[in-house]
Amino acid sequence: MSDLEHTENAPMEEPQDGLASFEDFDLHPEVLSAIRKMGFKEPTPVQSYTYREVASGRNVIIMAQTGTGKTAAFGIPFAQFLDREKGVQALVLAPTRELALQVAREIDNIGKGRGIKCAAVYGGASFTKQVDEVGAGAQIIVGTPGRVLDHMRRKTIRFDKISTVVLDEADEMLSMGFEKELFEIMSGLPGKKQTLLFSATIPEDIKRLSARYMDDAITISVSGDAIAAKEISHYVYLATGGDRRKDLLRLLKLERPTSAIIFCNTKDETQAVSKYIRKAGFNANWINSDLSQAEREKVMADTRKGKVKFLVATDVAARGIDISHLSHVINFSFPEALEIYIHRTGRTGRQGRHGAAVSLIAPQDIGNLYFLRLTYKIFPVEKTFPAGEDETRDLELDRMETLRKNFTAVSDGSFTGLARRLTQDLHAERLMAGLLEQYFVGVGADESKRPAEIAEPEPKPEPKPKPEPEPKPEPEPKPEPEPKPEPKPRPEPEKKDDEDQNYSEISIEAGRKDGLRISTLMKDIVEITGLNRATVGRVRMLSRSTFVAVPKESFKKVYSALGKIRLDGRKLKFKPAEES
């Protein structure tokens, strides 16, 4: 049974008992049919305990993990009660575009039968397209704080008829630094509205937000005895102090996860860790904020389809990621804040399934581990890595078992004689070792041990170009020292120097590593200024800076436009390049 409790600003009455089935919700037939088609059989606790409170128009703080069915907890009331003729009536704010898109898709599916539509509003996409989607009859806007605030300031979307606002994963939005944006958005909405706040944890900044904008709010905690799901098993391994990646490899071999998100604290770690375990034969890929939106979506699609078993990610990149049937969450780096631990581990053990959270910890993490026990009553089981000889023995026994399982069928006898000869050969040990290495590293039947990435050695066919020197006609190119005047392209810069006299550069203090993309930047400049894309000159993007060449006659217009562009909700810093 769920644990129901109140915060300081909540009224004293208890919420009503939960509803046992969707039939008890008294839904429109179209809504009931839609949720049945989506695979919902009975309400999850968060849906069961919140429906009547949400439907009554109350302000509600819902304390629930990711993966508990909270999108449907507000999506079903939207589909049931919103008027499809009244324009935009509900606003959902989410920390990331991935989550915004995911929420919008789910609400669209729930409300489809009643003509209730969602428009997703997030950074990196065209303003005009988003305005058109809202104008095409959307009743609900789901968006990230930065882009929603941009639309609000530009008055490109009207928010004056909003009757309900949802703050989804509110603690995540605040931890990402969106406090000012949230306060500005909430202040710009109609005074009389319902506010629903969903959060896995209730830190002080959440209390400040709810105290300011949520009068008489009732708090419902659907979190069991602690924030983390009871079904999750928590384990910690003490890192040996050497290369932590080697410890991770040993951990993976011992725990044998079928799929996992491996969390790192830095972007550099994600790539290094992914590359390391791929070389060891694990089907892995990485995701962090350096990837473009299209690249991130491809990695996520591969992960959902099972093409990637181990996703190595930072917390920022993993926000909004929803992967079902995830067996493990692994903390390569132990998080610096306990709330982050809760969010990470909440991605496994969903909807009653078993899950495991495994962490590598160093001596400096012991303090955080103590506070995890003290604050959330989560007591991870401490495990130790086996000694070298024990580990080798265990691995050999595991592989023996794998061979027994995979070769249960009786052979037709064609290789039996060869096998007998092999066991009697003077070099039997060496020959069998070679065959076993080929099997377990190259062919092995167990996909969790067999690397799809062993295809990486395939680059070895690159020596094939060596036959190319055989066709000795290629020495003919030797007279090609004549083409060496090809350095003549160098004079091109001279031509460009002439052209540069008609251009001025603007220096922007953001680049690839800050999430800036040339395509998005140019789209925004063209959209705001009305200039032709070909008019704007060369754009040079570095890791932390960007230079845009602009015709002198359009300089003021573009300079002014940059002041209106936001990167993750924040203003760009820029100046004329001459001042750089």
Image: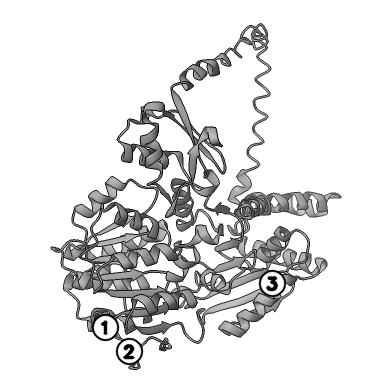
Q: Are marks 1 and 2 in contact (CB under 8 Å)?
A: yes
Residue 25, image x, y percentages: 23, 81
Q: Are marks 1 and 3 in contact (CB under 8 Å)?
A: no
What residue would you read off at disc 2?
Answer: 15
User: Rounded to the nearest whole Å, what is the CA distance between mark 1 and mark 2?
Assistant: 9 Å
Residue 516, image x, y percentages: 48, 45
**Nearer to us in this view, 267 or 235:** 267
Question: Residue at horizontal 42%, vertical 89%?
Answer: 5
- Observer able to see residue 359: yes
Mark 2, other Cα within 10 Å: few <14 / some 14–19 / many ≥20? some
What residue would you read off at disc 3?
Answer: 365
Q: Is 153 left, or right, of 548 in this rendering?
A: left
What residue would you read off at disc 1?
Answer: 52
Q: Are marks 2 and 3 in contact (CB under 8 Å)?
A: no
Mark 3, other Cα within 10 Å: few <14 / some 14–19 / many ≥20? some
Residue 401, image x, y percentages: 67, 66
Residue type (three-letter) at the residue carrying disc 2 = Pro
Residue type (three-letter) at the residue carrying disc 3 = Asp
> Which badge, 1 or 3, comes first in the chain's sequence?
1
- Observer able to see residue 64: no
**Nearer to us in this view, 462 or 487:** 487
Q: Of all residues shown, which one is farthest toward the front?
A: 579
Image quarter of the C terminus: top right
Residue type (three-letter) at the residue carrying disc 1 = Arg
Task: Please tell me whether mark 1 sits on a helix, a strand or a loop.
Answer: helix
Q: Of all residues shown, which one is farthest toward the right?
A: 426
Locate residue 363: give its quadrant: bottom right
Task: Please tell me whether mark 3 sits on a helix, a strand or a loop.
Answer: helix
